Every structure is written in structure tokens, then in C-alpha cells.
Image (cartoon, grey):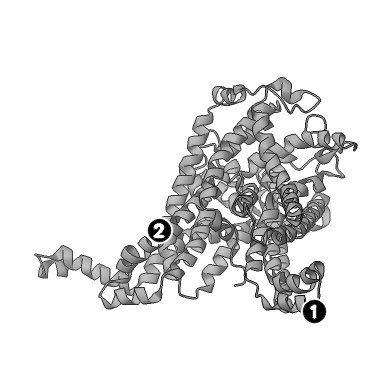
Amino acid sequence: MRTFLFYLTLALVLTPFLFVFAYMVTTSLKSPLDITSPDFKVLFTPTLDNYRKVFAENEFLRFGINSAVIATGSTAIALLLGAPAAYAIAHRHMPLFAVAILSSRITPGITFLIPWFIIFSRLGWVDTYRSLILAHLLINLPLAIWMLISYFEDVSPELIDAARVDGATSQRTFWSIVLPLTRGGIAATAILAFIFSWNNFMFSVVLALNTTKTLPVAVFNFMSYGNLEWGPITAAATIMTLPVVVLALLVQKQIVNGLSVRIDV
Amino acid sequence: MSIVKSEPLNTREALTERLGAWVDRHLPAVFLSPTVAFLILMMAFPIVFTLWLAFQNWIGGIAPAEFVGLENFRQLIFEDPRFWDALGHTFSFTALAVGAQVVIGVGVAHLLHREFVGRGIARSVFLLPMIATPVAVALVWRLMFQPDLGILNDILASLGFAGLDWTASQASVIPALALVDTWEWTSFIALIVLAGLSALPEWPYEAALVDGANGWQTFWHVTLPMVRPVIIVAAVFRLIEALKTFDLILVVTGGGPGFASETMNVYAYRLGFQYQRLGYSAALLIVFFLIILGITALLLRFRKTSS
């Protein structure tokens, strides 16, 4: 009886979380008539028309490619700059960096966006991949450093000392010993950085115009043109969410760590 | 160049070796400098620029900026009711959302803190709302909130209740938005607290058992005081993010109806990018930043004195 009550409570708690996703997917499979019908239709004939419409009436694929390019670019650079930086910080107390990482989380994003927009406009960089990748790096670089520090700290100092005794330089130790040992953590960091960039809306809605528009901005724009067609909107939302859900299931354990940041500096 | 002349045969090797030794000696500096350069250009400089901007009158960014001293701050505080409204909306949204998340999150953590079949699957389900693209989540809730079309009122009707206005009325728009935020972020608190619960020692529970405490007493007097520091840290993370909520509000209501759900971040965005009042927007952002910093510092102090 206790077990039954427990599973009943669990089911009740889980239902609202799953329900929203179920509602999104089922609405995306409904015809316009089924969506606007005054009573909610539990049973309906599924159709892929909404998905066809999303790809036929928009350059949806191009928005998807934009999202992927920007997310991949900012993730790659975040690891390239962040891994050496994290290695230099790990095992050392560097409060200045802790403060920098914390400030990037506390400061409202618009504070950065206004100067960036002015500067990027002068440089003619608005609506280019490079401005968006730079902007997304502000999220991804602190995230990468923050996560990688904890993985690098897990590598035993004895191993690093042993390499030094054998005559390896610090950079050699980093490249040949530390990086291979922390492959799993680096992969998890990359996946989380990719998700954060893919999901970003605020930076992209200001800096991306027509050429570099990302999926969240494109889907938001579908809606602001006034004509609310919920079928295609939910279809687009489903397509946009699917890759991050799949990626997130790969790195479940690291997600909470990635979303937190050390605040007790 | 003198090295090249004196060792013509293996200059390359010698140079590589010297460079290697130099990098080895200065490793932290070499490894940190690209990141430091990025942080100065993309973070420190924009912050300094915003500080400068806050004392200028600069509209549109084309005509030259004009120094106005504290005028922007004076207008903001004494002549702009929309600023005070935005501050109120930000606070009430944050208080409702984070309050609900802490209470439900701790409950869920307590529920999950035991061995059961399907624990892994339950954990995965809880992760989904946090990582799903916020714009997608917000769009689905926007549809669910529609008074006629949306499913929430259909559910209420099937249970025999009257439909609600949700985001359509000024009175209920903030609670409705807080509901979405709670849906999205309760799991964050739950999973952090769950990790905290797993790290607790066994003996206080044995002592409570000996003293004949019931389940609720044990939770209230034993578990809660021990996980309190973890709960406060998790709540502070959420608080910082909730104060800055942007995607959710812009997509679900756009700050409406009227300005009834316009928060500080949304107002700053409007000022900067729609009205192009760059200096005024910068002043608001500085005030907003100080508020976030103050609240964070206050709560962390509270954690230090309590633990």
C-alpha cells in the first residue's frame, strides 16, 4: 500500500512535466480544425501537414543551420580558450576568475548587448556569424572554464608531478596526460555549451537579422507576424527542442553542475 | 637573429625548444591570456562603456552623445512610473516563482530520496523542462493559456471550475508567468537538494528514531536544518536567474497586457532596442545590476550566519 501511494504521488508529480511536451507534440500533429475546435480533441487523425508547412513556407532549414553553426563555433572556441585557462586555474586559488565568472552570471545580458550592438554596427558585424559566436561565447566560455576546472582538479597531482620528474614540460603534460584523461568531462562540457548556445534567445534576437537568424528567433518571429497558426508553431517548437532533449539525456549527471556556478567566492 | 647565425643547422629545433621552455616557465600566463583578452574586450569593456553611457543622453546612437550628469538616474527614479512598475513586477514574479520552486522542489527531492524502480527515468523526466529550448516552452504555454483555445481552461471546465483569464488579465498575468517559471525550474532546486540529501549522515536519523519522532517531525527538525545551506544556495541561483527572466516574458506576453508584466529586463530591452534611448537604458541597467548584487549578497550573508 505504501509503495502504491508512493508511485501514485510520483505519477501525479511527473504528469505536469510530461504533459506540456505531450501537448506540444500532439498539437503539432493536429489539423487546424482540430486545434481550433472548442472542445479539446483527445482522439484525432494525426497529420504531418504542419511540419510540411514549416519547411515549405520558411527557410526553416537555413535557420537550423545557422543555429548549428553558431552553437558549434562558440562551443569549439569556448573549449579552445577555456581548457588551457581552466588548467591554469585548477589547483590554484584565483579569486579574480571566480569573480569574472560570477559577474557574467549576475550582470543582465542587455548590459553587454547595448555596447556590443553599437560596436558591431560600426564594424558592420551585425547579422554575421562572428558577432553571434562572440556573443554566445560570453555564456559558453565561463561555463566551459567552470566545468573543466572541476574535471582537471580530479586528475591526481601525483601523476602530474611524475610527468614533470620524467622531464615533460607543463604544456606537454596538459596535452598528453590531462586532456586524454578528462575526455569524458570535456565531451560533457561541449554538449552543455552546445545546448546553451542553441537555446539562447536574448543575444540572438538583437544581433541576428535575416542572414544569421537562429531557430528560437525565427520561431518567435512566426508568432509576432500576428497570424497565430498554432499547428506550424508547435511543429517548429518540437523540431527545435528535439536535438537538445537527445543531447541532454547523454549528459544528465553534468547538467545541474553546469547550471550552477560557485557563488561563495 | 643572432641565434640563427650562430646555429645555422638546427635553428628550428633550438627555437622550438627555447619557446617550449619559455611557455613552460610562463604557463599560467600563456594559458590564461586568450581568455583574459576575451573577458576584457567582451565583458569588462562593455561594462565600462555602459557606465559611461549612463551619464549621457544618446538617442539612436547616430548624433553625438551629450553628457547630462545624473539626469538619467533622476528621471528614472522621480519621473518614470513605468520603472517602478517594472521593479514591482520583477519582484513579485521572482518572489512567487522562486518561493513555489523552493517549496515544491524540496518536496520532490524528499520524494525522490529513496531507492525505487524507475528512479533513473524519473530523474530524466525532471531534467527535460530545464533544458528544453525556453522559447519553445514559452510558446506552448502561450497556447495553453489562451482562454478559449488553450487546454488549461478545458481542464478546469472538465473539473467543474470556471475558466481563468491567465495572461489575458492584468491581475493574473504575473502569477501565470510565475507558474511557467515554476514548471521550468522546480527540478533545478529538487536535483540540487537531492544531492544534498544524499550527502547527509545517518546518525541524526537513528537518534530521531530512538526518540520516537514521526516522519513529519524527522523531516522538519532533522532533515530540513541540515539541508538548509544547500537549499539557500539553490534558491540564490534561481533568484538571480528569475530576476533576469527575459525569454519567457517576451514570448508569452511581450510585457502585456498593457505593461502589466513588463519586468526590468524587458523594459531595458525596450528602452535600448525599440526606443533607442541608449543612455537611459544604461542607467536603468546599472540600477538593476546593483539590485541583483545587493539581494545576492544579502542572501549569502544570511546563509553564512545561519550555518
Q: Nearer the viewer, residue A2 or B174?
A: A2
The residue under the point 78% across, 28% down is A40
Circle 2 chain: A
The N terminus of chain A sits in image quarter: bottom right
Give residue A86's position: percent from left, percent from top: 45, 65
What residue do we see at 67% from left, 25% from top? A30
Q: Is residue B233 above or below residue A166?
A: above
CB under 8 Å between discs 1 and 2: no
Residue furthest out toward the front: A1
Marking on residue A183: 2
The label number, if any, that marks residue B211 in the structure image: 1
Helix, strand or loop at mark 2: helix
Q: Is residue B40 visible?
A: no
Closer-to-camera residue (A108/B56): A108
Q: Position of residue B144 (x, y in %)?
A: 75, 36
Which amino acid does the dot numbered 2 rest on? Arg
